Image (cartoon, rainbow, N blue to C red):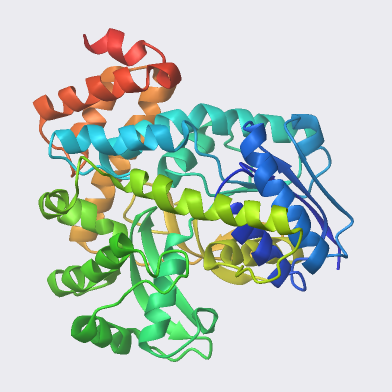
Amino acid sequence: MKRQKLCIVGAGSTYTLGMILSLIEEKEIFPLDSITFYDTDELRQETIAKATEILIHERYPELSSFTWTTNKEVAYKDVDFVFIQIRTGGLKMRVSDEKIPLKHHVVGQETCGPGGMAYGLRSIPDMIDIVNDIRKYSKDAWILNYTNPAAIVAEALKRQFPDDDRILNICDMPIAIMMSLAKTVNRSVWDIEAEYFGLNHFGWFTKITDIQGNDLTEAVKKVILYDGILPEDTLISTDDSWRQTFSQVRTMLEDYPDYIPNTYLQYYLYPNSIVKKLDVNYVRSEYVIDHREQEVFSLANQIIQQGNLTGLHVEADVHGQYMVKAAASLAYNLNKRYIVITKNNGIIPNISSEAMVEVTAELTSFGVKPYALKAIPTFYKGLMENQYAYEALVVDAYFEKNPRKLLQALVLNRTVIDTELAKKILLEMAEANEDYWGKWVLEGLQ
């Protein structure tokens, strides 16, 4: 079995230590020759890298090479896989993404609504640059991207690199939800399989089976309707905000009993009630800064100070394991089933063939092989077409530098709708993001 050369882009992320632990836990199915970290934030990356060096020394001594760099050529030269997890603008801009809409009583969230639009416009140029740089030094590397907002990023990359079939956009939310669904029937998440359709952060589970093919869907639904579900992923299981989010699945299933919803649908189906639960004076990103950021970097510094893991609790997370298992299926032609983002091309026959849909697919060394679906019902088709039109217009606006299309996008988005409201939010977003977007939005709307 060939040992792979891996580069992790955005290695200063709070998710990186979990990813390394996942790579260690899954090293039998995805053996590595080398790991290289790349980030533009040298100091942030160095802290995570020095802690990782100790992790690898203790738990992955067979790894031939581990290094970190801010040099693109060093990072991307002759690699087999690249995992991308960047956040353009950092958490500081995420605070802006959430607070500006909330000031106007609109959902403030990092991937949904106006916040997702702002984040997407920041992410697109960096993602395009990263892919171009990777292809300069490793033309055949698999690029696994889980940078948010994945739907907008995937749409932009599809247009910029239409013939590159080794770019795979993937999200960990479906597997995090599947952990909770598995718990309802006393199974491991790796012992169930799902049929799923939608757009990223905008989809539905239509069927849950065990790996022997037994249909568990109705049993899962009954438990959700009777008891509800809570997050099981260790990253979010004790987080009150995520617990409230998962509790909303019960309400959504009561109102729309056809399919089990992705948790993010709450922002589109119940925007008014969600806004009432959010606090403009202390948004989610501020909580992340005060808690997760502090916890992860405190742990990293403890590891560095001790020089070992003695007495410290570290474990892999489902976010990392999902990515590693997907990479293994691509590397070794395992034909395993995962929920991924891919061009529709008739998978869902009554949705645009150009849409970047999120569906169940087999991952092979030759690429993604999605499972074809039947035509979806009118309600779900209408929701998807509206959301895809919003996503497509955001990407149109970026490439054309057309602010009117951004306005159209926000008016289509179910969290906004009203034109005057959309104008106010868009102008404030443009002012806050001027260093990233440039002046074209402000100049075009004022």
- Which residue is situated farthest in the front direction here? 305
Q: Where is residue 81 in the image (x, y as percent from the top left)?
A: 72, 50
Q: Quarter of the image containing the C terminus?
A: top left
Tell me if 415 is positioned left or right of 146 in this view: left
Residue occupying the point 64% across, 44% down: 11
Residue occupying the point 67% across, 33% down: 42
**In the rendered image of this protein, does residue 362 appear above or below residue 164?**
below
Question: Which residue is more in the foreground, 380 or 100?
Answer: 100
Tell me if 148 is positioned left or right of 39 in this view: left
Question: Image quarter for residue 102?
Answer: top left
Question: Image quarter for residue 334?
Answer: bottom right
Residue occupying the point 37% across, 69% down: 238
**In the rendered image of this protein, does residue 151 appear above or below residue 319?**
above
**In the rendered image of this protein, does residue 140 appear above or below residue 330?**
above
**In the rendered image of this protein, does residue 293 appear above or below residue 320?**
above
Residue occupying the point 28% across, 51% down: 384
Is residue 208 in view from this perspective?
no
Question: Which residue is more in the foreground, 395 or 246?
Answer: 246
Count of all numbered marks drawn on residues in the image: 0
Q: Quarter of the image containing the N terminus?
A: bottom right
Q: Where is residue 253 in the image (x, y as percent from the top left)?
A: 20, 73
Q: Position of residue 290 (x, y in %)?
A: 40, 48
Q: Position of residue 412 (x, y in %)?
A: 20, 37
Is residue 380 in view from this perspective?
yes
